[in-house]
Amino acid sequence: MLVTVLHTSALSMMLTDAFETMVALTESICWKMVEKAVDSAGIGLVIYQKPVSNSCYEEHKERIIPLCHQKDRNKISWYTPLDSCLLPLSAAGSLSDHNWPTHWPVRLSSKPPSLSMEPSAEKLFYEDSKYWSALVSDVYLNGLGIDWLRIRNVIDMNAGYGGFAAALIGQPLWVMNVVPVDGPDTLPVIFDRGLIGVYHDWCEAFSTYPRTYDILHSSNLFGNLTQRCDIVYVVVEMDRILRPGGWILVQDNMEIINKINPLLQSLHWETSLHEGLLLVGRKGFWRPTDAGSSR
């Protein structure tokens, strides 16, 4: 659905040149106007519905916007110019012809339609889900001293198939699943599972307010990052978006952990190593004081 809100004084004011252009454009790509209304304050609402196939579009003699070529469908997700073409949909016209995810909550643990058809990919998906289910249950929820009832906002910095978020589904919190742009594109799988997520390059700032998140979780993220940017900048960004009293959980090799740990301690974080595999850090309320200011 596309919802457009227009500020108008009357219904006739909606038929401006801009609105007429939008109507013509949506009709040309077979989007259906399903609702149009204006309230007493003059605020207009228009709701469009996207078609489920290209059958209508292919019947048009004049195509204002062309269909994209197959080679254009696998572009990278970061710093890609906007396309002026439409991605092809199913040639058939019924919803049953689409490989939609199953209903919630079954879709959380069933095979995602967007998963590769390779048997190895399906096996990897289920192994990932099983791994995170056991680790979250046995270690994260019970072995780290975290009061999960006080946790609301979580980031999984290298979400993979979303197994970490799926394992936390019984907790009263939400997880932002981040798919790094230099790794495998697993965001469609995350969406198919009914989870939320975004692409991001962790060598850049994450678009959020300071002190937004209660937990930052990272699994095997930093190895690739250190090839492209200084790990100091990533740690500083993590400090920025984590609230005081919040936690980071870093699962990585010892070389990476030995680089991150002193950086966190220099920021007066409390850190510990759980079973030699998981770096656990808790942010305090310390902040550096300006050299020129009085204490």
Image: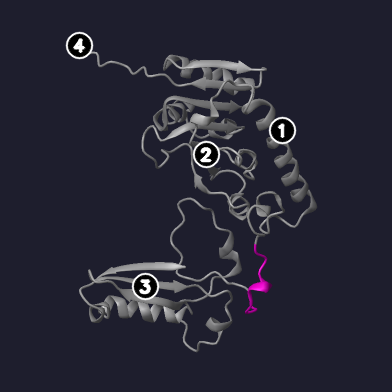
* Residue 271 percent location from the top left of the image: 53, 16
Residue 81 lies left or right of residue 145; in this view the side is left
Q: Quadrant of residue 133?
A: top right
Q: In this view, does 119 lie to the left or right of 39?
A: right
Q: Name the foreground residue: 77 vs 163.
A: 163
Q: Which of 76 and 196 is in front in this view?
A: 196
Place of residue 185 in the rendered image (x, y in percent of width and height, measured from the top left): 60, 50
Q: Residue at x 46, y 17 (%)?
A: 269
Residue 288, horizontal then vertical, whole percent: 32, 17
Is 242 drawn above or below residue 58 in the view shown? above
- For marks 4 and 3, give the one nearer the viewer: 3
Span shown in magenta: 91-100
Q: Residue 294 carries which label?
A: 4
Looking at the image, is mark 1 or mark 3 earlier in the sequence?
Answer: 3
Tell me, yes or no, whether the highlighted magenta stretch contains residue 6: no
Work out whether mark 4 precedes mark 1 in sequence or the reverse, and give the earlier one: 1
Residue depth check, mark 2 versus mark 1: number of the one nearer the observer: 2
Whole-angstrom CA distance, mark 4 to mark 2, is 41 Å
Q: What residue is disc 1 on?
A: 134
Does the image show residue 252?
Answer: no
Q: Which amino acid does label 3 sit on?
A: Val
Mark count: 4
Q: How far apart are marks 4 and 1 (CA)?
A: 51 Å
Q: Please say if the residues under marks 2 and 1 sit with CB atoms less than 8 Å apart.
A: no
**Upstream in sequence: badge 4 or badge 2:** 2
Q: What residue type is labelled 2?
A: Leu
